[in-house]
Amino acid sequence: MIHWTHSERGVTANIPVLGTGDSGFESRRSDIVHMKYKGFQRNIEDFVCEKCNTENIGDGYTNHCYMCLWSKHVDIKPGDRKESCQGLMKPIAVHTKDQDHVLTHKCEKCGFEKNNRVGKGDNFDEVVKIATSQAQAFVSK
């Protein structure tokens, strides 16, 4: 049975869940799903990066490895873990939005692109490398 609660932070659903699903992510709190807005499902999940093998501790908004910044194509809508592609997503570009750094990830399997904010604990040296590579590619055109 699902039990819904409402608060100023959104809607919380207590849902019984068996296993971790096919997304490749291991959830620490798979029994609780937070929805901040329609379509978003906050899942607090830890995962091992499939690119660099770094262990990542999720906070419910984590969508890429903090060390190498690679992601995985697991969502159709943010947090739903329903995407069948499951391809690795390369960080290909950096830009700023509202004073935040934003990565553009591109799926190496299907070509899908998605923007994601750089987190406080992310490896900023990697962000600089991506930005430098992006600038060099622009200049050499």
Image (cartoon, helix red, strand yellow):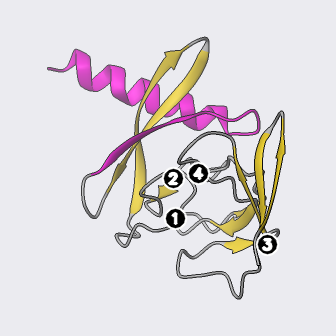
Which residue is at the front of the view, 99 or 139? 99
Distance in Å between CA atoms under marks 1 and 3: 28 Å
Q: Is residue 22 above or below residue 65?
A: below
Q: Amino acid at mark 3?
A: Asp
Between marks 3 and 4 in the image, the one whose residue lies nearer the viewer: 3
| Disc 1 target residue | 51
| Disc 2 target residue | 70
Q: Dot 4, crowdedness within 10 Å: few (<14), some or many (≥20)?
A: many
Distance in Å between CA atoms under marks 3 and 2: 27 Å
Determine whether label 3 and label 2 are within 8 Å by CB. no
Between marks 3 and 2 in the image, the one whose residue lies nearer the viewer: 3
Q: Earlier in the sequence, mark 1 or mark 4?
A: 1
Distance in Å between CA atoms under marks 2 and 1: 7 Å
| Disc 4 target residue | 64
- Judging from the image, what secondary structure is the residue with disc 3 in? loop
Q: Position of residue 60 (x, y in %)?
A: 73, 52
- Residue span colored magenta: 112-141
Q: Is residue 125 magenta?
A: yes
Between marks 1 and 3 in the image, the one whose residue lies nearer the viewer: 3
Distance in Å between CA atoms under marks 1 and 4: 11 Å
